[in-house]
Image (spheres, helix red, strand yellow):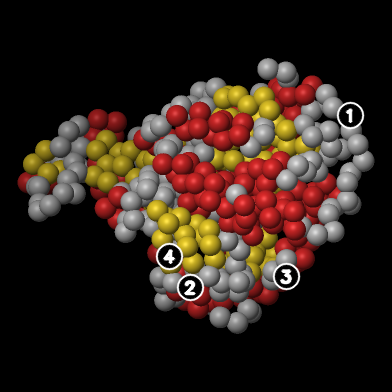
Amino acid sequence: MMAASGALMALPRTAAAAAPANWDWARREIEKRHDESIKRIQTWIHTPSIAAENRNYPAGAELTAELFREAGFQGVTQVPTDGKPGVFGYIDAGAPRTAGLYFMYDVKQFDPAEWSSPPLEAALVDKPGLGKCIVGRGAVNQKGPEGTFLAALHAIRGAGRKLPVNLVMVAEGEEEIGSPHFGQIVRRPDILAALKKCTSVYMPSASQDPPNGTVEITLGAKGIIELELVSTGAKWGRGPDKDVHSSLKAMLDSPAWHLVMALNTLVADGGNTPAIEGIFEHVRPLSDHEKAMLAKQAGEPGAEAVMKKALGVKRFINDLEFRQALERLASQPTVNIEGLVAGYTGPGGKTILPGRAVAKLDLRLVPNMTAAEAEAKLKAHLAKHGFGDIEVNVTGGYDPTETAEDSSLIRATKAVYGRAGVEIDVGPRSAGSWPGYIFTGDPLRLPAGHFGLGHGSGAHAPNEYYVVESANPKVAGIDGAALSHVQFLHELATIK
């Protein structure tokens, strides 16, 4: 394979072409390919790569690579790592500018019994008020939006048009376990050289919220570490090293209670405030400008009711007002229990004293924190409080990411959404996480974020969906979302 850095210099550079005055050519081609665009996403959903279960590797990477080739990417190759393989490709259009893209091809686990439509069937389901939707694991996170971007590339090529920018694509198969080996993909010398030619990196998304089709542009995302804490009698030196009869609790220590006591030291305020020693040492408070962004969001009519209904809650932490809750969401690190297991949890009772207990946790990190620092402080805290025997197994994680509001990426995003007549909110950061730090940090220091019209919901949950034919004129279906990517690529090519 030709080295990526060389390939992107192989064709002569031409002046940036102005964006088309109208987009009828793109609309026609996208609409003509509507069914194939849906089918592409459905095919992708049929093959779920799940890193936590070691499922469909390397099949997921192979399918992703084939989809990239079909969309016109050159030099497509699987990238070996110490974990699951990545996928890399590029398109050299001879353009003056190059845009980077981040994809993930893995998905979260699922229990078919919890779904009303089989999670791998990718069935088309009519949802009242939304329209025709693909329902399946990965539908919105992220195969629907990513497949829609590929549909935009097919439409540009099918219409006989030239890409306005060169593209560099990096994809991973471990995002859902904290991207533990993504750095090995990005820092491969030829891939890093290709990314250094980019003006920005973005991940396709389905950004619109019904009923008004508004979008929130976030200027970053929290970081994360995912881990498990394991308490065993064998490591502790107290309690049994295997499950024993529960009557023996009168004379034996319990590894399960030992874990519960350890967990209790990690939080205060009823579990709502991290209490790991030093965890707030480098936390950067919200600026006045960030507070103003959040105040604007809190003041939007009906926003609080919509959020509470979507989350299935009646009140926020400590009965906070909406504005305060949004500020906390954006600014606070968290210690969350994802799962807690010890002993027997099946039907009926089983009177045992477990010899092993496990808690799965995630810690969300805000600006000026690092994943390495959070891990070190957690371990030091446990040791200081008498729980140094508890194993801390970090499975993945990364630092927070930030992008300036005046960067070309964010200005291009605002411009395309604005011309589409979409109402825009700007927020300081997403409370969720993605490994954008690999692009915004050293050595690349590129603006990175998300873009894409359209709507979907249910990420990580049963009945995840992505709207492909919208019943709401204010929310784009797959064709409108694909057109937004065509327009965005042209905007990236010309933004000053």
> How far, Cα to Cα, is label 2 from label 4?
9 Å
Residue 28, position as x, y percentages in the image:
68, 55
Chain-order first, disc 4 or disc 3 = 4
Residue 132, position as x, y percentages in the image:
47, 62
**Residue sitting at x 80%, y 52%:** 491
> How far, Cα to Cα, is label 3 from label 2?
20 Å
Q: Is residue 258 visible?
A: no
The residue tagged with tag 3: helix, strand or loop? loop
Q: Give the vertical position of 494 relative to 395 (above or below).
A: below
Chain-order first, disc 3 or disc 1 = 1
Q: Residue furthest right?
A: 15
Q: Kindly identify which residue carries mark 1.
A: 12
Classify 10 Å Cα crowding around label 4: few (below 14), some (14-19), many (20 and above). Answer: some
Q: Kindly identify which residue carries mark 2.
A: 129
Q: Left or right? Give the position of 86 relative to 89.
A: left
Q: Kindly identify which residue carries mark 3.
A: 421
Residue 348, position as x, y percentages in the image:
9, 53
